Image (cartoon, rainbow, N blue to C red):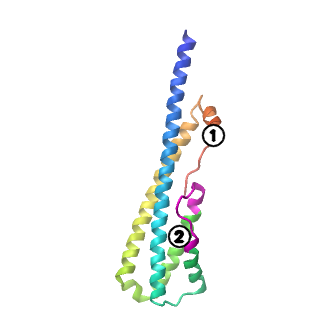
Amino acid sequence: MILVILFFIYVGLLVYVMSMIALFKGKLKKRLVAISVLFSEKKGILQAIGAEFKKAKVNLSLADNAAIINLDSIEAAGIKDSDVVPTSAKLKEIQKRFNFIAETNSWVTTGGDYQSFTASLHDIDANYRQSIALYNADVTAYNYWIHTPLFGWLAWLFGHRSKGPLN
């Protein structure tokens, strides 16, 4: 009789743990979609800044032209967790290049378009940092639930593996 009660308690806890794993796995997917949207917005703004530079006939180096061309090849939609850090680094590098170009050309810093682009990029960067922090918190919770004693082996059998935080 006691074994039957313990079995039902175990099954109930198993259902609860598996539902928590599914909940946090869903949250992780939603966080990646949010990060992907932020990358798409940042890419669009950087493309607009590049177009402004070309329209104003700013003297760009070969590396700057390559950065503008490289911007088109960055895939921001449907990003995987392993692609977040490299994509962020590429976008950040291009943003630094554009900031340097803007500092060396005084007309850019006085123009209203560039100032609004810069403000939008700052907002996107703040939202990106917040999204990364939320993703990392959800990764911690997900890893906690898949390593729950007595249930971790079942989570492993169902294909739930540990995830690492994004930096």
Q: Is residue 75 magenta?
A: yes
Quick one: label 2, few (<14), some, or many (20+) residues within 10 Å? Answer: many
Q: Is residue 106 left or right of 78 when viewed as pictured?
A: left
Disc 1 designates what residue? 159
Among the 4 quarters of the image, the one containing residue 160: top right
Q: Residue at x 42, y 60 (%)?
A: 127
Q: Are marks 1 and 2 in contact (CB under 8 Å)?
A: no
Secondary structure beneath label 1: loop
Residue range highlighted in magenta: 71-85
Nearer to us of marks 1 and 2 is 1
Counting from the top left corner in percent of width and height, residue 93 is at: 55, 73
Measuring from the top left, give residue 22's x and y in whole percent: 52, 39
Residue 94 in the image: above or below residue 81: below
- Is the residue 38 above or below the residue 140 in the image? below
Which residue does the image show at 52% across and 90% down from the upper left? 59
Asked if 104 appears above or below 92 in the picture, the reply is below
- Let me know if residue 25 is in the magenta part: no
Image-based side of 125 in relation to 157, left or right:
left
Residue ID for mark 2: 91
Question: What amino acid type is highlighted by mark number 2?
Answer: Leu
Residue type (three-letter) at the residue carrying disc 1: Gly
Q: Is residue 162 left or right of residue 118?
A: right
